[in-house]
Amino acid sequence: MSLRAAQVRFYVDADILGLGKILGGLRNDVTYPGDPGAFVHKRHRAPCPIASPDVLDTDWIPDVAARGWLIVTRDSMIIQNRNEIAAIRENNAKMVALNQRDAQIKWGQLEVFMTQWRHIEALTSERGPFIWRVSRTAMTSIPLD
């Protein structure tokens, strides 16, 4: 059996690490901070270059953005976090932020992600910078200015 390298498209932030581990176990195109790498569906995913969940957002966003990965987070204060918005804008990053109310626990996070899966996956081919707030029923663009 020959294994090929996986092409990562999604980076799940440390604030929803449990969801990252669930998705990383099911999909070879998902990674998360501290991901040791895995073999999923005959593909090998390399260890995540963000070695620890303790790395600051403003430090890992440039690296993740440079790789073209779509960031999945649950940042309830994203609108007020000017430094993070600036990092997204300056690095042409792509982000979806799961709605805090809908995504308080892993099950809710998984529900939001799967309910909006087709829309979220389509964002991987879009150019950044952007941030979308995602709930079970809607996706709303967040202004970057």
Image: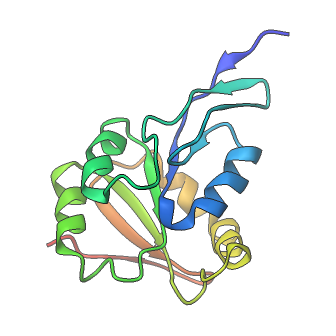
Nearer-the-camera pick, 43 or 145: 43
Q: Residue at x 43, y 34 (%)?
A: 49
Where in the figure is residue 96, as x and y percent of width and height?
45, 65
Q: In what quadrant of the picture does the C terminus appear?
A: bottom left
Q: In the figure, 68 relative to 81: above or below?
A: above
Is 133 left, or right, of 31 in this rendering? Answer: left
Q: Residue at x 47, y 65 (%)?
A: 73
Most distant residue in the right direction? 1
Is 128 left, or right, of 32 in this rendering? Answer: left
The image quadrant that residue 101 belongs to is: bottom right
Q: Which residue is drawn at 76% across and 46% down?
A: 26
Where in the figure is residue 18, as x and y percent of width and height?
65, 62
The chosen color scheme is: rainbow
Q: In the figure, 46 relative to 1: above or below?
A: below
Where in the figure is residue 55, as x and y percent of width and height?
36, 52
Where in the figure is residue 138, as x and y percent of width and height?
54, 82
The image quadrant that residue 117 belongs to is: bottom right
Q: Residue at x 50, y 48 (%)?
A: 33
